Image (cartoon, helix red, strand yellow):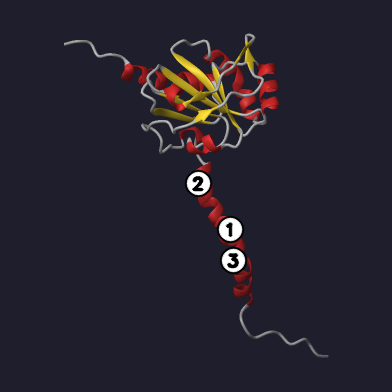
Amino acid sequence: MTTAPTDSGAPRPRRRVVAFLPLILFVALAAVFYSRLGAGDPSELPSVLIGKPVPTFDLPPVAGLTRDGAAVPGFSSAELAGGGVTLVNVFASWCVPCRDEHPVLVELAKDDRFRLVGLNYKDAADNATRFLGALGNPYAAVGADERGRVGIDWGVYGVPETFVVAPDGTIAYKHVGPLTPESVRTVLLPEVEKALAKAAPKPAG
């Protein structure tokens, strides 16, 4: 009775390691990517635009969008300088977290310390009008960024995102992800107050 010859060449364990090497490398790279971008609070992702003037832009209004019977205007970078504090909220009708965030924006719009405007990102006008028609329009102005070019200039990672723009037209703060009552109370409004304090005239003497 004979037995099949065995392979006396390279040891099998080494062959197995080589076979799984691509998978090992993929898992390692995925872990590094997650640790840098996925871990922690996404709202704390830094922005290179903090402290710098808002990018130059001029967004048209969303076609057909009205508020209290009047057409809602678009807005431009020129309108964000020389006035008060502005909150720029990046949203889209196809964004599920935007729908969850919307009641918070409705409440924010009642605060007269700042102006709330919307940047409608990569959206169709009819979808945006239906979205705001169903949920209510909290924005004083809404700019249509259908191709997303202005959003790219603002460094938008995704939607929703909210920027605090100081009265001098510089970006004071960026919040990534949906706003919640807690994040508004503990983070966003304190950032608004900082922006207002910088704009307030200093007492004489």
Marks 3 and 1, the one that precedes in the sequence: 3
Residue 23 at x, y percent in the picture: 61, 61
Marks 3 and 2, the one that precedes in the sequence: 3
* Image: 47 above or below 25: above
Q: What's the residue at 59%, 74% (across, down)?
A: 14
Label 2 and label 1: CA atoms lie apart by: 14 Å
Rendered-image quadrant of the N terminus: bottom right
Which residue bears the numbered disc 3? 21
Which residue bears the numbered disc 1? 26
Label 3 and label 1: CA atoms lie apart by: 9 Å
Q: Are marks 2 and 1 in contact (CB under 8 Å)?
A: no
Q: Relative to 157, is 3 on the left or the right?
A: right
Q: Can you tell which mark lies on residue 190?
A: none
Which residue bears the numbered disc 2? 35
Question: Relative to the observer, which residue lies in front, 66 or 52?
Answer: 66
Circle 2 packing at 10 Å, graded few (<14), some (14-19), many (20+), is: few
Is label 2 in a helix, a strand or a loop? helix
Residue 18 at x, y percent in the picture: 60, 71
Q: Are marks 3 and 2 in contact (CB under 8 Å)?
A: no
Question: Relative to the observer, which residue lies in front, 55 or 178?
Answer: 55
Circle 1 packing at 10 Å, graded few (<14), some (14-19), many (20+), is: few
Is label 3 in a helix, a strand or a loop? helix
Residue 99 at x, y percent in the picture: 64, 24
Circle 3 packing at 10 Å, graded few (<14), some (14-19), many (20+), is: few
Residue 139 at x, y percent in the picture: 56, 17
Is label 1 in a helix, a strand or a loop? helix
Marks 2 and 1, the one that precedes in the sequence: 1
Q: Residue furthest right?
A: 1
Question: Relative to the observer, which residue lies in front, 205 or 68?
Answer: 68
Q: What's the residue at 42%, 31% (across, down)?
A: 54
> Type of residue at label 3?
Leu
> Type of residue at label 1?
Phe
